Amino acid sequence: MDRILIIEDDPVTAEAVAECVRGLGLEPVTQITLEAGVSAAIQMDFKVIVLDRMLPGGDGVDAMARMRAGGSRAMILVLSALGRAANRVEGLEKGADDYLPKPFEPDELRARLRALLRRASIEVLDNDLLAFGDLEIRMKARTVYVKRAHVPVSPKEFELITFFARNAGQIVTRMQLLEQVWKLHFDPGTNVVDVHVGRLRRKLEGAGCAAIQTARGEGYVFDPLGAEVSG
Amino acid sequence: MRVVPAATLRLAAVVAVAVTLLSLAGMALQYRLVEARLMDEAGRLLAADLDGFATLYEQRRIIALRQAIEFRAASGASGEMLMLMNRDGTVLAGTHADWPVAVVPEGAGFGPDGAVRFAAGGQDWLGVGRVLPGGFPLLVARDLGPVLDTLSALRRGIVALGFAMLAAGALVGWVMAGRVMARIGRVNVLADRVAAGDLSARLPGLRSADEFGQLEAHVHEMLDKIEALNRETHRLSDTIAHELRTPLNRMLQKLGRIEGQDAVTDDLRAEMRQTVRVFDALLDISRAEADAVVAGGPGGGLRPVDLSALLVELWELYEPLAEDKGLVTQIAVPDGLRVLGDRTLISQMVANLLDNAVKYCRAGDSLTLTLAEVGDRQVMTLADTGPGLPADLRETVFDRFARGERDRALPGHGLGLALVRAIATRHGAKLTLPQREKGFAIEVGWPKVAATL
């Protein structure tokens, strides 16, 4: 069974994360100090490391380089109370693959973990054509077709649908969209993302493809084939 | 930054001029003394001549004088002028042809009193004119040429020495000023490094026991304090975040276990999210304000940001929201205007302003975003025709938790514009609220970036 390393000193949080991990069908391994966490990251093989920052022994973000140098190839998700935009940007710039501030919704964490697991398994996605039944996305031409008819989308909408396509069948949260598509690492308060997703959704539906659905809670699911939603 | 060493030059010039003036004053005094001595000497020689003629006059009156003068004239001595005139103005005897016009004969004795200096035949003379009993004018004068030659040689020497002193003074001054300024320069270089964001920069080596060492020690002490304060600010904001978010996180995890009361739990989630936003905004504000001071002021620790592209991106994020609300939107942002900044902070600032505009405006209102170079600033203007600022807010709109009575019903925490101001301060940007006939307008003037960045 694939493992996920949780380096977290708060037992309630650690257990909440472990529960999410088990829910994804993976095995959680918890360490409560930075040193123990770094050793574990180097000695064992993990898919993802969920890393806290203000740990006994130091800041997790500063230890990422040591884990990488020690040979760990795991994706790193920083899960921290240092959740201001500046903290998040700092963590990502220092090499984290994702950064989720506390307090976090279990749904949000699950979505992030799934996206990371997916990235870990499909490293390169260089197909020019992404096809989901009637829906076709042509990467190089940056165009979208439904039932062979061209659906005009703005550059941002194209990035949006590409991100959805890469995470097809899974819940994608608003926060993820803001971070990944708009590169914004703060909570703008208003759900600006909804308007954009709504527009894209109406364009696709107008062409006869109900690809985007609202998921309960914080996000959306891109599911052009109408497969069972795994949430 | 290339600095003209104006202070070094000034100090060197002051030293050079002071040294030169002092030595010139000394030499001028000496010149006066020498001149007085030489003139005294000339006067004594004249008196001796007069004594000689007095003795001759005692013996055989005018005849003796006439013979003596004729003898002197014949011997061709050029260093003296002797004239003896007849009652009718004709020359009885003389070394020269005419009585010099500048000398008026007066008195009858052979004393040296009333000696006058005069010019005749291209030479300078010191002499006395007398009228001897019976009406015979007598002139006895000595050539001042040798004296004047000596004095002019002395003057030339003084001038040459003056220039030499000036050059030497300038050299010594330059070397000394250079050494003084080099010590000050070290402190300046340190200040520049700190301004560029390196708060831990210090001068290497030991402090010397002089005033400069003291200056360096004081600067170091100040930097230590600022650094400690800065570290403390960072640590405190991290601690606040940790101590607040960890329990909130536990609550949120426990909320997830409550079933069947979705409306209540969703409310609680929204409240918690709002709490986190308020604390983040407060921490962002104090952090931006602290960095504006400790990162060496605006510019320190910032990177070049393509403001045009960033504004267009944020505009595109909010525009659909505005359109859906029925606003008439317009953007005029030329390509490629850059500022020194923090991308995330600028995004937060602009997002806050756009969010406010969309929140307060109603269908039919217009919303305009422009960016333009005005003087030495890149000025971003966001203007709407919405309800504008409530009168009770005009003074305090940028304060923390400032909210108009009118807007109590709208969601918000009154920190948006306080954060906008803190971020503007962090960037050294000028924030103004231009008066408009209708609606709200805000101008942010970023300092321009040097073309090389």
Image: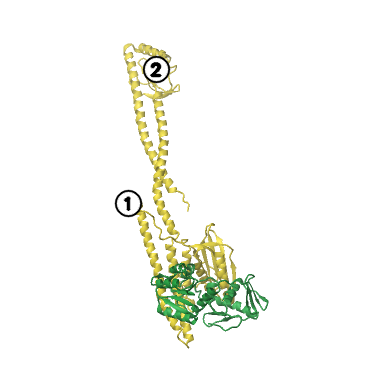
Residue A162 in the image: x percent, y percent? 59, 74
Note whether B103 is above or below A33 in the view shown.
above
Looking at the image, residue B287 sits to the left or right of residue A175; the answer is left
Question: Chain coloured yellow: which letter?
Answer: B
Looking at the image, residue B387 sits to the left or right of residue B43; the answer is right
Mark pair 2, 1: CA separation: 76 Å
Mark 2 and mark 1 on one chain: yes
Which residue position is annotated with label 1?
A: B209
Identify the secondary structure beneath mark 1: loop
Q: Residues within 10 Å of mark 1 (few under 14, many from 20)?
A: few
- Foreground: A206 or B411? A206
Query: Quick check: can you spot residue B242?
Result: yes
> Residue B46 is drawn in which quadrant?
top left
Disc 2 is attached to a residue of which chain? B
Label 1 is placed on what type of residue?
A: Ala
Question: Chain coloured green: which letter?
Answer: A
Q: Residues within 10 Å of mark 2 (few under 14, many from 20)?
A: many
- Foreground: A55 or A198? A55
* Comes first in the chain, label 2 or label 1: 2
Disc 1 is attached to a residue of which chain? B
Query: Quick check: can you spot residue B113?
Result: no
- Foreground: B99 or B152? B152
Which residue position is annotated with label 2?
A: B82
Label 2 is placed on what type of residue?
A: Leu
> Residue B214 is drawn in which quadrant?
bottom left
> Residue B202 is drawn in which quadrant?
bottom left
